[in-house]
Image (cartoon, rainbow, N blue to C red):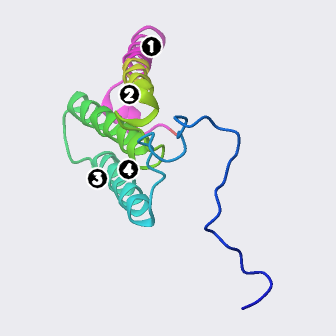
Amino acid sequence: MSANTHDHSHHHDHGHAHGDDHHHDSGEDHGSFKSYMIGFILSVILTAIPFWLVMGDVIENRTTTVLIIMIFGVIQVFVHMIYFLHMNTKSQGGWIFMSLLFTLVVVMITLVGSLWVMYNMNKNMMPPMTMEQMRNMP
């Protein structure tokens, strides 16, 4: 045995009250390599599919393509919140779940507001162009 070996049988008292065991039983999941890899793979898939839809011109209707991309974006936000930020209904006494709902509201306001602004700017500022004119733009 070396001199650096520690005896782990002694009691660690760091000044916390007896019922204050917030380090282990708070419902927090600090993730594992497997959960990070699942989150990473899902993120790549949720990015690659909308990219393929746009670059491959898979769906003729632009509105449908935009809606599908928005759905994939919202799903990706939840993947990031669950697999990378470790949010669930048990951690922090439910406050994390409330922040999840708040995030959903903010994402919807941002997405809908951005599309509304872009639509109005396109409608009010751009001269009418045919598809052929758009293809020939520099």
Indicate the amino acid at tag 1.
Answer: Val
Q: To which residue does mark 1 refer?
A: 117
Q: Say whether disc 1 or disc 4 marks the residue closer to the N-terminus.
A: 4
Out of 113 and 34, give the one closest to the viewer. Answer: 34
- Residue 126 forms part of the magenta stretch: yes
Q: Earlier in the sequence, mark 2 or mark 1?
A: 2
Q: Residues within 10 Å of mark 4 (few under 14, many from 20)?
A: some
Residue denoted by label 2: 97
Q: Secondary structure at mark 2?
A: helix
User: CA separation, marks 3 and 4?
Assistant: 14 Å
Q: Earlier in the sequence, mark 2 or mark 4?
A: 4
In the rendered view, does 113 fall on the left or right side of 11?
Answer: left
Main secondary structure found in the magenta portion = helix
Report the amino acid beneath label 3: Gly
- The extreme front residue here reads 10
**Cα distance, mark 1 to mark 3?**
26 Å
Mark 1 vs mark 3: give the one in front.
1
Q: Could you tell which of marks 1 and 3 lies nearer the N-terminus?
A: 3
**Amino acid, disc 2:** Phe
Residues at circles 2 and 4 in contact by the CB criterion of under 8 Å: no
Q: Secondary structure at mark 4?
A: helix
Residue 18 at what x, y percent from top left? 56, 37
- Distance between the Cα atoms at labels 1 and 4? 24 Å
What residue would you read off at disc 4? 47
Q: Secondary structure at mark 3?
A: loop
Q: According to the image, label 3 marks what residue?
A: 56
User: Which stretch appears magenta?
Assistant: 109-137
- The N terminus - image quarter: bottom right
Q: Amino acid at mark 4?
A: Thr
